[in-house]
Image (cartoon, grey):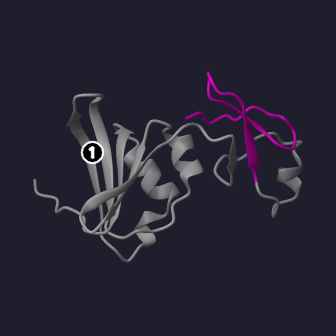
Amino acid sequence: MVINSITNGIVLDHIQAGKSMELYNILNLGELECSVAIIKNANSRKMGKKDIIKIDEVIDLNLDVIGYVDPGITVNIIIDGARHKSTNLALPDKVTGVILCKNPRCITTTEQELTHVFRLTDRENGVYRCMYCESKANVTP
């Protein structure tokens, strides 16, 4: 399989095997006009198997969302065919608009236009709680 190198763009590397499609959907990469390549189950000395996403354009990405889905991802910015910047992610302190509060008594249930905001309350276990009602997020990274 041949996937061309990127001249200017972004490479999301070290994605846990199987998580690339979730990132693709959450980041709305299907709406981009540029080429986007998803490499699933690539061999990795560090991880055994990993996924990679290559975006053939430098765009703004929500690093908090990426860090929530998989805090082990490395974001590489490619300029003129060379790695310009590399960022290792971690769990973000706050996630906005990704996790939905399932508490029926939460204000986000009745106020539909209110953005769902979750704060990281336990970094070691990856626990997020709703900013409004303190309910624990049902979805964990």
Rendered-image quadrant of the C terminus: top right
Q: Is residue 17 above or below residue 3?
A: above
Where is residue 8 drawn, in percent x and y?
31, 69
Residue at the location (63% across, 41% down)?
92
- Give yes or no for residue 23 being in the magenta stretch: no
| Rendering quarter of residue 122 | top right
Q: Amino acid at mark 1?
A: Lys
Total labels: the figure holds: 1
Which residue, given by chain and number where applicable, does mark 1 sit on? 40
Where is residue 132 drawn, in percent x and y?
87, 44
Which is more toward the observer, 101 or 80? 80
Q: Main secondary structure of the magenta part?
A: loop
Which is more toward the observer, 140 or 48? 48
Which is more toward the observer, 121 or 82? 82
Question: Residue lying farthest top?
Answer: 124
Q: Considering the numbered disc 1 on the image, is that residue within a helix, a strand or a loop?
A: strand
Magenta range:
116-141
Where is residue 88 drawn, in percent x and y?
46, 41
Where is residue 12 drawn, in percent x and y?
37, 50
Q: Is residue 35 above or below residue 54?
A: below
Residue at the location (59% across, 49% down)?
64
| Rendering quarter of residue 137 | top right
Q: Is residue 124 left or right of residue 130?
A: left
Question: Residue lying farthest left?
Answer: 1
Residue at the location (50% across, 41% down)?
89
